[in-house]
Image (cartoon, rainbow, N blue to C red):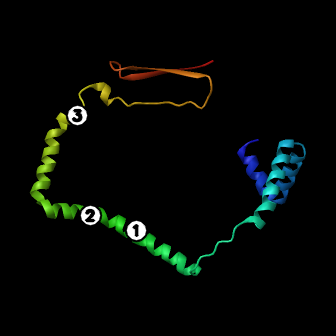
Amino acid sequence: MNPETELKLQAWVDGELPAAEAARLAAQAANDPALQALARQLRAVKAALPGNELARSVPETREFYWGTIQRALERAEVTDTVRPVWRWRAWLGAYGWRTALGAALLLVLAAPVLRPRHPAALAPQVQVDSPLENVNSYTFRSEADGMTVMWVSSQ
């Protein structure tokens, strides 16, 4: 049984399917014991939930509660968009433009020194996970040819 059939069965139990599709699924469930068992479980859960759900109350009114959340979200959005600009201005105000230009020049001059020299350090590291059982994979990387070969075999 696939997930789409399970979701349609749940919609059928909840009475949310159109009549033609509900009739087609009812006929399919009449011939499939797995669908019948799942339908029984879904009906049992549907019957058990309404009477056993805990009632939760909030001391404030609903409008006050959601208004507080909305104001907090708006403040968070404003501070997140403004904060990086103020950090640069504060840094430049504390150290000045000359220091910023000196740091940029130092980075430009140091870039060739900081770059990895070995080509293997530049090669992407790839890890492959297989959801299949009894599958082996072997990987070979040729730096001279600049290529990776992967052999996958199943037993």
- Counting every numbered tag in the picture gives 3
The reply, left or right, for residue 38 in relation to residue 131 is right
Q: Is residue 121 left or right of residue 50?
A: left
State the CA–CA distance, disc 2 to disc 1. 15 Å
Q: Nearer the viewer, residue 27 or 34?
A: 34
Where residue 8 appears, as percent x and y from the top left, is 76, 52
Q: Which residue is mark 2?
A: 85
Marks 1, 3: nearer the viewer: 1
Which amino acid is tagged 1? Ala
How far is the residue under mark 1 from the one under mark 3? 38 Å
Q: Residue at x 16, y 61 (%)?
A: 92
**Label 2: how many Cα within 10 Å (few below 14, some 14–19, many 20+):** few
Q: Position of residue 26 (x, y in %)?
A: 87, 51
In this rendering, would 115 be left or right of 6?
left
User: Which secondary structure lies at badge 1?
Assistant: helix
Q: Would you call the spot at circle 3 few (<14 residues within 10 Å), some (14-19), or many (20 or more)?
A: few
Identity of the amino acid at label 3?
Arg
Label 1 vs 3, first from the N-terminus: 1
Residue 15 visible? The answer is no
Q: Secondary structure at mark 2?
A: helix
Disc nearer the start of the sequence (2/1): 1
> Residue 115 shows which numbered tag?
3
> Mark 3 and mark 2: span between their CA atoms?
30 Å
For numbered disc 3, what is the local secondary structure? loop
Figure quadrant of residue 118: top left
Q: Residue 7 appears at what percent x and percent y? A: 73, 51
Q: Which mark is residue 38?
A: none
93 sits left or right of 63 in the view: left
Residue at 84% from the left image edge and 55% from the top image edge: 22
Which residue position is annotated with label 1? 76
- Measuring 79% from the left and 54% from the top, which residue is drawn there? 42
User: Where does the N terminus fall, quadrant-wise?
Assistant: top right
